[in-house]
Image (cartoon, rainbow, N blue to C red):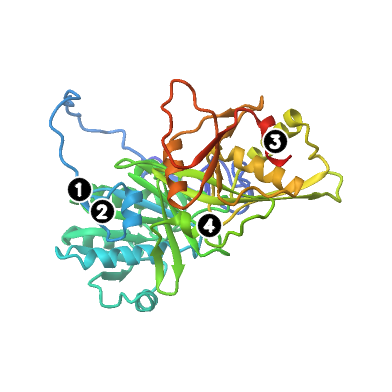
Amino acid sequence: MAKKDAKQYVCRTCGSVYPKWQGKCDACGEWNTIAEEIVGGGGFSNISPRRSKGNLIDFVPLSGAQEHLSRLSTGIRELDRVSGGGLVSGSVILVGGDPGIGKSTLLLQACAKIAEQPEKPEVYYISGEEAIDQVRIRAKRLGLEKSPVNLASCTDIKDILITLEKANAAVVIIDSIQTMYLDEVESTPGSVGQVRACSYELIKLAKRKGFVLFLVGHVTKQGELAGPRVLEHMVDTVLYFEGERGHHFRILRAVKNRYGATDEIGVFEMQDQGLVEIENPSALFLAERQGNISGSCVFAGIEGSRPVLVEIQALVSPTSYSSPKRAVVGWDSNRLAMVLAVLEARCGMSLSSQDVYLNIAGGLRISEPAADLAVAMAVISSLTNKPLPADMVIFGEIGLSGEVRGVSQPSLRLKEAGKLGFASAIVPPTHSKEKKIKTDVNIHEIGNVQRIINWFN
């Protein structure tokens, strides 16, 4: 007698499994995201207990001849930078981002440039969210309607697999993986089981045929990729497309890359003709900066292998509430709370009766702790209403005891500052074992946050 299929209930947002249905997911807090899935009876995720006898595995030493990785250029330098120098044959790239941020636009521009290369590689763009006419309208707006891209609108994975099996594809784009479905999985498209099953079949074909596979993924309200977490482990590269709707800048960030560096970024500007790559983002981020204004300073940061200079703005004002307000855009709010606590405890500053607003101009998100010193000086500048020199850059990490610690690649940060015309810099002290930095920028070293007050006396 065949074993009856078992049922389980899986959250479509985070993938948590429950023995029975409930309205709210305890793991992610979302409502009405738990759906029924069938487990067993030949389902996708099960392995039959009757298995044929396996074969012995051949082991080899670590040393040996390596196969050269051939890379395919996308024709977009910023995308090539983030992917590690180009697209590796057989690699799988997962692209996520908020709705309307420009994921489909970027990939349509990339596949058009790839298809126009002299080698004439075959590029397939398969849309599950839009009809063919909708994609053609976008292509015409971008001036790409004459590009030799193979376009289709389909959501059935079996049809896609049969078509790609007979094709000689170089690049395949699936937009998006949440719209695809497999008949054997008894759940709706976008569920954890469907996303896992469809991704597995597509990735298996891409590895065997050797074409580059782009998977467009939806994100949750928290900004994480929707679907099972195993999806990010299955792919070779994970790219996040970031940007504020009020800004025209877009940041393509690599958070995982088996064929290149992680935390690399590409900078784009959204225009009428599509996404335009920005070769010098520092100059663009500082283009609208006004000097000699209190609460403003320039931070020299590092994003991947690229130095980026951005303006940090702080506003301190007396609060009208029992507890002061802390508003942060583009930085970690917990990091701001720590910096303010250090300024109160080590510098004797009174911020408990002040509202503090912090903004990273240009829509860029900063994650490195090297911005601590720049944030602290911007806050003090706003509190004292005394501006910092307009031609000064600042970077350094602040510890809880008030010390200013060194950061990575200071020479690269100062080189970028000198290239953009900055004359001075406030940096952490250089230790005796470190090489002295050679630069035309006038360097001022600060070892403790208490010395910051001297700049405003």
Question: As displayed, is residue 20 above or below residue 209?
Answer: above
Classify residue 102 by image quadrant: bottom left
Front disc: 1 or 4: 4
**270 and 167: which one is in front?**
270
| Residue 360: numbered disc | none
Front disc: 3 or 4: 3
State the residue at coordinates (38%, 78%): 141
Local SS, label 3: helix
Q: CA distance from mark 3 to mark 4?
A: 26 Å
| Residue 212: numbered disc | 2
Front disc: 1 or 2: 2
Whichever of callouts 2 and 4 sits on the residue coming sooner in the sequence is: 2
Local SS, label 2: strand
The residue where tag 4 is placed is: 286
Q: Are marks 1 and 2 in contact (CB under 8 Å)?
A: no
Residue 419 x, y percent position in the rendering: 42, 50
Q: Are marks 2 and 4 in contact (CB under 8 Å)?
A: no
Classify residue 269 by image quadrant: bottom left
**Within 10 angstroms of label 3, few (less than 14), some, or many (20 or more) residues?**
few
The residue where tag 3 is placed is: 454
- Is residue 12 something that shows in the picture? no
Amino acid type at mark 1: Arg
Question: Relative to 193, is 26 on the left or the right?
Answer: right
State the residue at coordinates (75%, 29%): 345
Amino acid type at mark 4: Leu
The residue where tag 1 is placed is: 208
**18 and 264: which one is in front?**
264
Whichever of callouts 3 and 4 sits on the residue coming sooner in the sequence is: 4
